Image (tube, grey):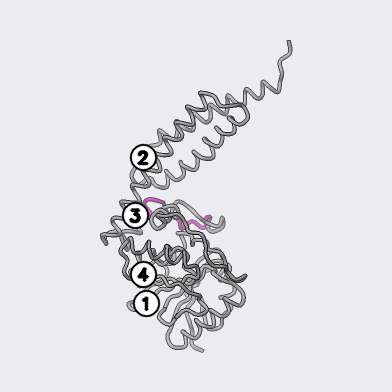
Amino acid sequence: MLRNPTRLLRRHWLEETLTDVSAELDRLERNATVWAEEGFQARVEALDVLETDVLDRIDEIARSDGETEVLQELRWRAYVLRRTLEEANRQLIEKLRESIRSGQGRGEELERRLRAYTGDDADDSLAEEGGYSALDALIGGLFMTAPVPAETRLRTPEMVCYQPTPGRIILDLCRTVHFAAGDAFCDLGSGLGQVAILVHLLTSVKARGVEYESAYCTYARACAGDLGLMEVEFVEGDALESDLSGGTVFYMYTPFTGAVLETVLRRLEAVARFRAIRVLTYGPCTLAVRHEAWLANEQGSRLDAMHLAVFRSVRS
């Protein structure tokens, strides 16, 4: 009697997939790197593999061939491993938060830990890909301890929806910009506050965020307050109207475009008539800012949308 070739192929695929899934779980469970305290990056990568190469494949088999004891056992192993890895990361993050509250986990010590836990994110390939990594997962864990609130205000067409600055850009900012005594950092369109908070923690500069969305502003204030940061403040307001006179270093991750960006640049130019300022940009707004005659490229920074751009004001 002839066997059904389609059924044989299906059975072969099923057995091969189950073998692969089991082997992947074995590999993850035996990977010593994920169990080390500083193995945050390895755990983030392992969690991603668990979702895409293990649990998604188990669900695919269950949908097509039905639930079995073998699938239930594999799924249980994956769930246990996922909970264990997530708990290890949670404990590491809470330990880091405690060190920040105590005042010890700041400056060079904080940067050392961020890099030790997540690797060196100064890789240009991240910029080409658009760029989020394990560093962003760690920063999110540190500063996003509650669900992101829904927006409560309507944005105008030239206001850009919130998107967090990649962590590698924040580290690049702190490494590139040499803050002096008396400097004041201002993030225009500060969102959930991660840039202002991390810049302050890494450099000790006084930091301020200006945010149009009130729910985001409240969220950022709560995060800074929980960490005991007295020199970080968040102001609910429109960059078209908010007081910018106290800032010396301004950062924008393309919070607005068109006429709104043009008006904000004119306001910053007015501030620069009284004292030298620096303007830092990331994203598409760099392509517009680089044409401003009152700004000069500082330190030969790359003036494209994928890298941090640093400008300084010049007198005409």
Q: Contact, CB < 8 Å: mark 2 with mark 3?
A: no
Circle number at residue 191: none
Say which quarter of the image contains residue 266: bottom right
Which amino acid is tagged 2?
Trp
Q: Contact, CB < 8 Å: mark 3 with mark 1?
A: no
Circle number at residue 35: 2
Disc 3 to disc 1, how far (Cα)?
A: 26 Å
Circle number at residue 183: 1
Q: Give the residue displayed 42% in from the left and 62% down from the top.
A: 219
Q: Residues within 10 Å of mark 1 (few under 14, many from 20)?
A: some
| 149 horizontally vs 284: left or right | left
Circle number at residue 113: 3
Q: Give the residue displayed 42% in from the left and 56% down from the top.
A: 144
Quarter of the image with the N terminus in it: top right
Mark 1 or mark 2, earlier in chain: 2
Disc 1 is placed on an element classified as loop
Range covered by the magenta-colored residues: 115-126
Q: Contact, CB < 8 Å: mark 1 with mark 2?
A: no
Which amino acid is tagged 3?
Arg
Q: Is residue 21 visible?
A: yes
* In the depicted structure, whether residue 185 falls above or below residue 139: below
Disc 2 to disc 3, how far (Cα)?
A: 17 Å
Q: Which residue is mark 4?
A: 232
